[in-house]
Amino acid sequence: MPVKDRTRAPDLLLRFSVDQPPDEAYRLVVRQLGDSLARAGFGLEGHAGGTLKDGESEFGIVSTWKPGHELRVTVKPVDWTDSPDVSLRLRFEEAARGSLVTLEILGWKASLRSAGGEIGDWAAVVLLPAIYRQFSPVGFGDWVMDQQARRPSGESALATYRDPTYHWPNFLLILDRLHLTSSDRLVDVGCGGGAFLRKALESGCSAVGIDHSLEMVRLAQDVNRTAIEAGRLDVVAGSADDLPVDSDSFTSCVCTGVFNFFPAPMGALREMFRALAPGGRLAIFTDTAAAQGTPAAPEPFASRCRFYEPNELAELARKAGFAGVRVEEPDLEPYAKAAKLPADVAAHFVGTGGAVLLLAAKPGSARKKAPGFGESRATGGT
Ligand SMILES: C[S@@+](CC[C@H](N)C(=O)[O-])C[C@H]1O[C@@H](n2cnc3c(N)ncnc32)[C@H](O)[C@@H]1O
């Protein structure tokens, strides 16, 4: 006998696709939901039987927890009376490429119509706007970009930045140009998981790494534990436009894979200028407009980052006070080979399109002469 489907029709339904397969999409989206609720002041425990709390008050429960398939959070009035509950349900289906995610809010209108209806009110005022903001294409794209690169966090980001395969060619390029020695003192702005620092420290230099992601700071500390214990490295939390370092204190400043994220780059450039000692050298590696929308800078980055023409970048550096400014549009393939990347990965670095390395110096002579830059295929200069 056919069973009557008692599932209530959702009051709100949102469907979106993500690139990850359902298991991974589930972890990603549940985490995003938790972040979204946290911003609205609520704590969600993402596991079977987990609670939804507002401070100490528990007013919701994870009523369905099926990783890769379904999550349901049921919200009840604080006094757990019989008034109708409101549920948020996320369903995950495998799609041709990744997963299709369906987000539904159930029982909202019924709650609004019921006596009291406080959960319906709460859903209308707090839950729905928070969720809509987060899962709208704009909110979702921002979140993904933050998680992956602008303020990396989560397991997948930790794994990526511990050993960022695709960054090794530009790490080697920068080191080739800076040829650091044991008398150098380096600051790495937006140091991520500290992989560049680890390589740079092989020169015998001392260094400070700065990042605004606490998870990256902890990872960079972990990756470089020996250098920290030897007193050659500090890794600290901080923002590029307010560097937590003394003025005139570094011989070299590196900022790689970060500059595109700055909404107002002059603030960061002025801080790098301040941090460098006279004669100190700056190396910024970033993407040009040619990279926008390519595998080097796909969505959601393509529409959210700032991309610079080489000359524009040079002009910004001059405005911040730097001299000897020059820009390279490097062919990274030799560096990909030097980094011993697998052939299929190295193939991404053939050609010059899309990357720019800016080299410049703070005017004045270093107390100990700075070594200058290494050989380059420079395309511009002052
Ligand atoms: C794409 S990752 C690159 C990390 C590292 N430089 C590398 O190449 O592997 C960008 C890093 O810059 C950091 N970042 C972005 N904007 C920042 C800012 N305004 N201040 C400090 N760190 C920032 C992020 O947290 C992230 O760790």
Image: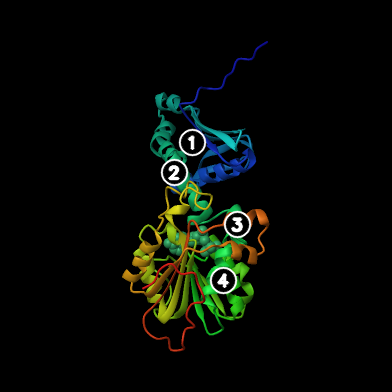
Q: CA distance from mark 1 to mark 2?
A: 33 Å
Residue 327 quadrant? bottom left
Q: Which mark is residue 160?
A: 3
Residue extending farthest top: 1
**Residue 321 location (% of width, % of height):** 33, 74
Q: Amino acid at mark 2?
A: Gly
Q: Amino acid at mark 1?
A: Asp
Instruction: Label 2, secondary structure: give it.
Output: helix
Q: Closer to us: mark 3 or mark 2?
A: 3
Q: CA distance from mark 3 to mark 2?
A: 23 Å
Q: CA distance from mark 4 to mark 3?
A: 15 Å
Q: CA distance from mark 1 to mark 3?
A: 45 Å
**Residue 21 location (% of width, % of height):** 63, 40
Discs 1, 2 touching: Cβ within 8 Å:
no
Q: Closer to us: mark 4 or mark 2?
A: 4
Residue that label 1 marks: 79
Discs 1, 4 touching: Cβ within 8 Å:
no
Residues packed near mark 1 inside 10 Å, few (<14), some (14 to 19) or many (20 plus):
few
Mark 1 / mark 2, whichever is N-terminal: 1
Instruction: Label 4, secondary structure: give it.
Output: helix
Residue that label 4 marks: 197
Relative side of 223 to 362, left or right: right
| Foreground pick, 149 / 71 | 149
Residue that label 2 marks: 139
Mark 4 / mark 2, whichever is N-terminal: 2
Mark 3 / mark 2, whichever is N-terminal: 2
